[in-house]
Amino acid sequence: MTKTADLSLLFVVFIWGVTFVMVQNALSFLEPFTFNAVRFSLAFLFLLIPYWCTVKQRQKTGDKGLLLAGIHIGVWLFLGYGFQTVGLNYTTPAKTGFITGLSVIMVPVFSLLLLKHKLSRPTIIGVGSATVGLYLMTFADRSTMNIGDLLVFLCAISFAMQIITTARYAKSMPALPLTLIQLSTVSLLSFSSAFIFNEDHSVIFRPSVMLQKDVWTALLVTAALATAFAFFAQTFFQAYTTPTRVALIFSMEPVFAALSSYILIGEKLTLSSLIGCALIFLGMILAELPSRRRKMKISQDIS
């Protein structure tokens, strides 16, 4: 089951990586919050069908606790996708993938600040490596940081918080209804933001827009695979593999983003950007390596 879990999560990360280009193309027709509102609404509907087909009795978890937990996670998820989708208007898919991947580094850092978990030496080295890599990607070829890079960095912070809050609730609450509440929260907040920021949300009723290949393809793929399937699979399969293996698998997202960006739109990266990407990737791996003390403890337990 562990191998199945790892392969399933790797497929999820592959989907996340390759959809950066698709989302950027769709944003030529739909504005960011409107796109996310439709995407998460469709994802909610995709999961609602199996939910009604499989749930035959009330869940043991209290409805109020489940609702609050789902909303809590959903708010961070909304912020993550909101910052990411808007940021894609100003930066490239490859850079978006790598900077978003910094959330893997931030999880242990936020665990130290919020949960008082100590950082291992590999984690500290990993954070330093990723920081240098981020500098090379965003500052080496220009005097100031691109606004898109900053927005995607805020997205990475939000995703890190979403991972932490998910870890807090996922063990004690059913995965499918918890995922449904998250998705509905993101959808409602995205529709509200579209009104607040005066986006032309009426485009979702225009066949001339919604029937554009870049639009309906991006919406269907991101809603069905990159959202409904991905978030349910992440919650379900993490029970069958270790956090370290999950983090290493998730660190492949920016690699898939860069490769798909190169293949699909021919995006070129400068030497400093390539070095920055490598350092961020190295940092994501180092941050999840077990410390020497933990290795000794595992050896003692085995013996």
Image (tube, rainbow, N blue to C red):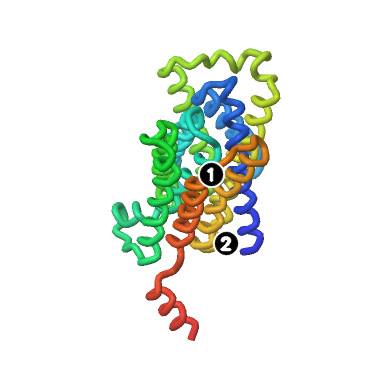
Q: Residues within 10 Å of mark 2 (few under 14, many from 20)?
A: few
User: Is 117 left, or right, of 246 in this rendering?
Assistant: left
**First-in-chain label (2 vs 1):** 1
Give the residue displayed 67% in from the left and 13% down from the top. Answer: 208
Looking at the rendered structure, the kind of residue marked 2 is Tyr
Q: Nearer the viewer, residue 299 or 233?
A: 299
Write down the residue under mark 2: 240
Give the residue displayed 50% in from the left and 28% down from the top. Answer: 89
Q: Position of residue 44 (x, y in %)?
A: 58, 34
Q: Position of residue 178 (x, y in %)?
A: 50, 43
Give the residue displayed 56% in from the left and 13% down from the top. Answer: 202
Q: Position of residue 276 (x, y in %)?
A: 47, 49
Q: Is residue 200 above or below residue 79?
A: above
Looking at the rendered structure, the kind of residue marked 1 is Arg
Q: Position of residue 261 (x, y in %)?
A: 61, 39
- Secondary structure beneath dot 2 equals helix
Q: Nearer the viewer, residue 300 or 287?
A: 287
User: Is 83 left, or right, of 211 in this rendering?
Assistant: left
Give the residue displayed 46% in from the left and 38% down from the top. Answer: 77
Write down the residue under mark 1: 58
Camera-near label (2 vs 1) is 2
Q: Residue furthest bottom?
A: 303
User: Is 228 left, or right, of 149 in this rendering?
Assistant: right
Image quarter hosting the N terminus: bottom right
Residue 112 appears in the figure: yes
Q: Residues within 10 Å of mark 1 (few under 14, many from 20)?
A: few
